[in-house]
Amino acid sequence: MNKLLAVVKREYLEGVRTRSFLITTMLGPLLMLGISVLPVMVMSRIGGGTTRIAVVDQTNRMYERVRDHITRDNAEATANRRNERTTRGGVSGARYELEQVALANNSLEETKRNLSERVRRGELNAYVVIPPNVLENGKVEYYARNTSDVFTAERMRNRITSAVVEQRMSDAQIDQGRLAELQRRVEIDAIKVDGEGERRDSGSFWLAYIVGGVIYAMVLLYGNAVLSSVVEEKTTRVSEVLFSSIRPLPLLAGKLLGVSLVALTQVIVWVLVSVLLSLYGAGALVASGAEFTLPRIRPEVYVYLILFFLVGYFVYSTCYALVGSMVTTAQEGTGMAMPITFMFVIAFVLTTPVISNPNSSFSVLMSLIPFFSPIIMLLRIMTETPPFWQIALSLLIGFASIVGLMWIAARVYRTGMLMYGKRATIPEVMRWVRQP
């Protein structure tokens, strides 16, 4: 036991003292902050300008409707700017300035040339040509300096479509107010029914995706660290010295536990920072008058999150250690570890049918496979909690798989670490596992 603890301590201290650990620990929260805050800040700074658009109305009766529908956003933008507390947490609405342009010398082509020149000079951002038969074929021409701005183009399409539909109804003498009332959308108030009664579903199943993403990131980062550490000990022949004082199983277990504690330390830092940022963001939303409710999550769900996180991390990390024992270089290990990464990708692909029918035989089976259970079972717990025996069985299979994989990895480790010059083949690995 003392030797195992010594290995764990060595691996942990070496991991947390590295420059890469410090950098990733500090950059992780900054990256999350940048992803969530920077786009809003940038859009609020550069997205609040006025978009100048010219309209060539060949129908001679559509311009006013098009102008009213497009400039509808101006009132929203003004309201957002007046409510500074709301604007601080969101993106200011877009503003549009429209002008009607008559045909130059009754020539559409000459008018378009003049408008295109104004666009090139920066006097206009775009111009729209409404043909005479727009009410029949529903087609308009949109010319812009930046056609990659799909948001503005989509907004133009929606606004002009609304104007054309309104004009068609007016021509058909349909009461637009009555039609709008009849077409009013129905709002769905989703209420979840489970063993605890009835409650509104707050979408807490997204936590399963978050935990799965954290496991995936940790496996990629620290699973490769385990692989590289094993290969390094193999190439430097440090393992020969270590095997003289400690057996392969506690050596491998100590290495995995030490690296896992490094990963856990980083995850704790990230979680604490994320919680603080979330509480700050929630407080800002509530202070601005926005309705915001935290997802209601049962206390035992947090226990399941931790347990399945451990299952997923140790299952995949042990597989990385197994691969490291078989190869001679880190490059070979990266190639052989690709199937391990694919297993995680498959788990995310399977989430769609599981969410649709969490209690199907397929979902139950996938949630019991240790390579998939950290994602699939958590999704089942979040969407429609399965019987406790299924959760317990999944955890039991998961931890039993960790023990079995570690036993297999240790038997491969004891022989593979002493083999140099070539990568082990599958038959050789099977023979190492069978050796007493």
Image: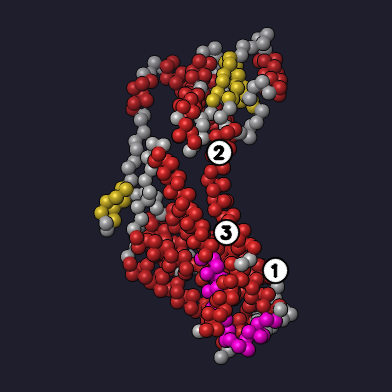
Left or right relative to 131: residue 419: right
| Residue 116 in view, yes or no | no
| Residue 330 in view, yes or no | yes
Q: Residue at x 42, y 62 (%)?
A: 305
Report if residue 241 lies within the magenta region. Answer: yes
Label 1 or label 3, whichever lies nearer to me, is 3
Q: Counting other residues with Cα less than 10 Å from the Cα at mark 3, is it few (<14), some (14-19), or many (20 or more)? A: some
Instruction: State the mark number for residue 25.
Output: 3
Sequence-first disc among 2 and 1: 2
| Image x and y of residue 408, in percent | 55, 81
The CA span between labels 1 and 3 is 26 Å
Residue to which mark 1 is pinned: 331
The CA span between labels 2 and 3 is 24 Å
From which residue to which does the magenta span run?
237-264
Position of the C terminus by quadrant? bottom right
Q: What is the quadrant of residue 14 in the picture?
A: bottom right
Residue to which mark 2 is pinned: 41
